[in-house]
Image (cartoon, helix red, strand yellow):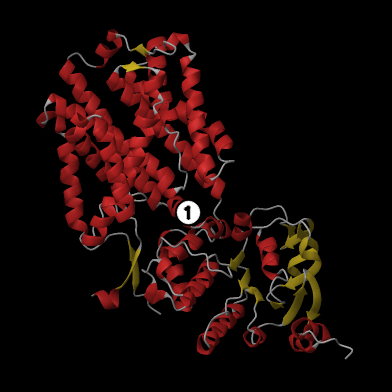
Amino acid sequence: MKNDNTVRFTPKNYVVTAVLLAIVTAALAAAPYWLGRADLRLAGEIMLYISLATLWNLLAGYAGLVSVGQQAYVGLGGYMLFAFTIFIGVPPILAIPIAGVIGALLAIPVAFLVFRLRGAYFAIGTWVIAEVFRLSFAQISALGGGSGTSIPASIVKSMAETRAARESLSYWLAFGLAAFIILFVYLYLRSSKGLALTAIRDNELAASSLGIDIWKTKFFTYVVSAALTSMVGALIFLQKLRISPDAAFSVNDWTAFVIFIVVIGGIGTIEGPIIGAIIFFALRETLADLGTGYLITLGVVAIIIMLKAPNGIWGILRDRFDISFFPLLYRVENQKQDR
Amino acid sequence: MNYILSVSDLSKSFGAVTVADEQNFGVTQGEALGIIGPNGAGKTSLFNLITGTLAPTSGTITYCGESITKQSAALRCKKGIARSFQVPQPFSGMTVFENALVAATQAANLRGQAAYDFCIKVLEQTELLAKANIVAGQLTLLDRKRLELTRALCTKPKLLLLDEIAGGLTESECVSLVDTIKAIHAEGVTIIWIEHVVHALLAVVDRLIVIDFGRIVANGNPQQTMNSDQVREIYLGIDADV
């Protein structure tokens, strides 16, 4: 019997989205040539938040690990950058992957601890761990203790001679890391391990009965996302040039805003965190003058989205226009019928 | 005897409630074994013990000559024990095809085109191919049950555990399901089938086990077992002496 069915990832208007994606990527890669200084800085910040949101989405939206303690790895990455550049003299760009490796190594014992907890207890557990990280780094006087420290000017100058060159480099690092993280998450989810992860998200009982080692799959996802979050953290504080325990391990900056971004953009999709980050920064830039009113507005927006569009802004767009920039859905097509 | 699966002195209790009480039985390669018993007798619990989603209080489970008592559910599935759940447990956010693909890639270890082709073949057999792109959460009860069977088959099982897969189906649906199960059995898959729809069960099985209060009260030829006094007593409540 001849098989008339084929399986493809690609949706109908694949060429349009692929071309669009290529144009946007090229434009963003060339941003230092067409954006002003302030805008370039903002674009870099957006890239870093896209990275954080993509990683949190991988944890919460796919692995079902709702962590409110990812600031532990942001802060750890930042501190590792400072420690390795100041004390050991490692070039800052090399210190970023080192921060990632250390993040992964620390995530292993942390995972053994917090994986004993489920649901809300897991969330609180991760937050407590992050607080332990914050209090521990506040004890290290070599890194400025509770008041923090700055990167010496000589190390900053070693990256690039002029200020403009440093700012371009800083942006490219943020853009490169964001692109790498999105590509990694996309390929991971398209792999058979990613299929297992999505199955776990939907039904753990069925997943374990179909040969999926739930603990191992979640563990791998947690450790990898901790490593990448640490790298993002290192990059964040390479831009800030100053670090303190309160800034490094801020639950507001590195987790609450990130959750907001993922929820309004669309949890459990790759496009969601990207769109969410753009909306978050659009709101922040337009409402910054309102003071506390800005945070209240963010809260109201989040509540409305959760009530009216649980799949986020991307969920609405996807259902309406049947588009996908990062197709993950397997489609079975019958060639007899479709041709 | 050359058993593919055997349990010896298998017991499980939750406090005062005993769901498996010193059970001993074996299933030979290629056999189709039926299990009946009243609600709450411990039939599904027995499947949970065999597949590893429940750990026994005591006793051992031997599969293909090896004790699997302490192994994880995932590992047992990879070794060829598959089940369908009584209450369907679909991956509701994934399509029917993706549900099948999870089983084929994770348990049967197939990759790429080989996995796709195998899933499509199984979906054809279970009459779900036309619904391959539908999200599983939107399926009707009948299709959810078919999906349970599809996923179990996509693991390439040696031993297939079916838990009340005919419950709630219409007569014609039931007939087509029995045909499907017969075809699977004819391919050499060993089957253990829990079912309340006895005529469907008797059309397939070679042997029948009756469980009541976690105990095996009868084990033998299906027709003789159905006519035995113990079964009449359990189901009809008639004292055998009257």
Left or right? Give the position of A21 relative to A303.
left
Q: Chain of mark 1?
A: A
Residue A184 in view in this figure: yes
Q: Position of residue B52 (x, y in %)?
A: 66, 58
Q: Nearer the viewer, residue B143 or A173?
A: B143
In x, y percent, where is residue B17?
Answer: 76, 62
Vertical placement of residue A193 versus B21, above or below: above
In the rendered image of this protein, does residue A222 appear above or below residue B87?
Answer: above
The image quadrant that residue B174 belongs to is bottom right
Q: Is residue A199 above or below residue B223?
A: above
Query: Does A8 appear above or below B185?
Result: above
Q: Where is residue A32, by image quadrant? A: top left
Q: Secondary structure at mark 1?
A: helix
The residue drawn where x is 54% and y is 32% is A110
Which residue is outermost to the right?
Answer: B241
Q: Position of residue A149 (x, y in %)?
A: 37, 12
Horizontal and vertical percent for residue B97? 41, 66
At 22% from the left and 40% from the top, the residue drawn is A278
Which quarter of the image is occupied by the N terminus of chain A? Answer: bottom left
Residue type highlighted by circle 1: Ala
Q: Is residue A311 left or right of residue A201?
A: left
Q: Which residue is mark 1?
A: A196
* Res. B96 visible in picture: no
